[in-house]
Amino acid sequence: MITVKFETLGENVTIPHRQSHEAAGYDVHAYIPEPFTIRKGEIAAVATGLRVEVPSGYLLSVRPRSGLSFKHGVTCVNSPGTIDADYRGEVKILLINLGPKDYTIEPGERIAQFLLEKSYAIEWQRADLSESQRGEAGFGSTGKT
């Protein structure tokens, strides 16, 4: 198990947690004083009341909650979002309402999920690339199925 240190920015901040033992994601909750409406087509930065210290060599990936996305069309606008190991500010979740109607977020509501992921340092090397069967064929070039 890997430890992620955190601080809360007030009382009653909900610590990210899994809904089941095998769940990959840790649910993140809105830390807002009152209900907040995201109008259809609108983007909002929603407070979590959390500051985190991600271990060096890792990142926290911010991902949408499937139920919120499927039922209401509310999802993370920059999915997946990235919380870097050296960031120490409050984590805010960037949500967009792609649904057919306005959506109201309640205080303490689950709005996203965190996944801890390994981050690798990359050494970029300029080189002539090898040939491949696909070559430069781009979007949609591998077929429908």
Image (cartoon, grey):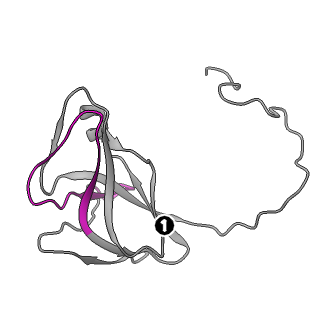
Q: Is residue 61 left or right of residue 94?
A: right
Q: Residue 105 magenta-drawn? A: no
Residue nearer the viewer, 68 or 49: 49
Residue 64 image offset from top left, x and y in percent: 35, 46
Q: Badge 1 is on which residue?
A: 59
The location of residue 49, given as percent across then percent down, is: 23, 68
Q: Which residues are magenta?
A: 20-49
| Magenta highlight on residue 31 | yes
User: Can I make out residue 83 in this image?
Assistant: yes
Residue 90 in which image quadrant: bottom left
Q: Is residue 21 above or below residue 90?
A: above
**Residue pictured at 20% horizontal, 57% vertical:** 30
Asked if 53 appears above or below 65 in the picture, the reply is below
Q: Position of residue 129 (x, y in %)?
A: 88, 48
Asked whether residue 65 is in view, the answer is no
- At x 80%, y 33%, the residue is 136
> Mark 1, residues whose alpha carbon is within 10 Å: few (<14), some, or many (≥20)?
many
Residue at screen point 65% across, 25% down:
140
Q: Please report the residue visible at 8 percent of the width from the left and 55 percent of the height from the top.
A: 34
Q: x, y (%) of residue 123?
A: 75, 67
Q: Quadrant of the N terminus?
A: bottom left
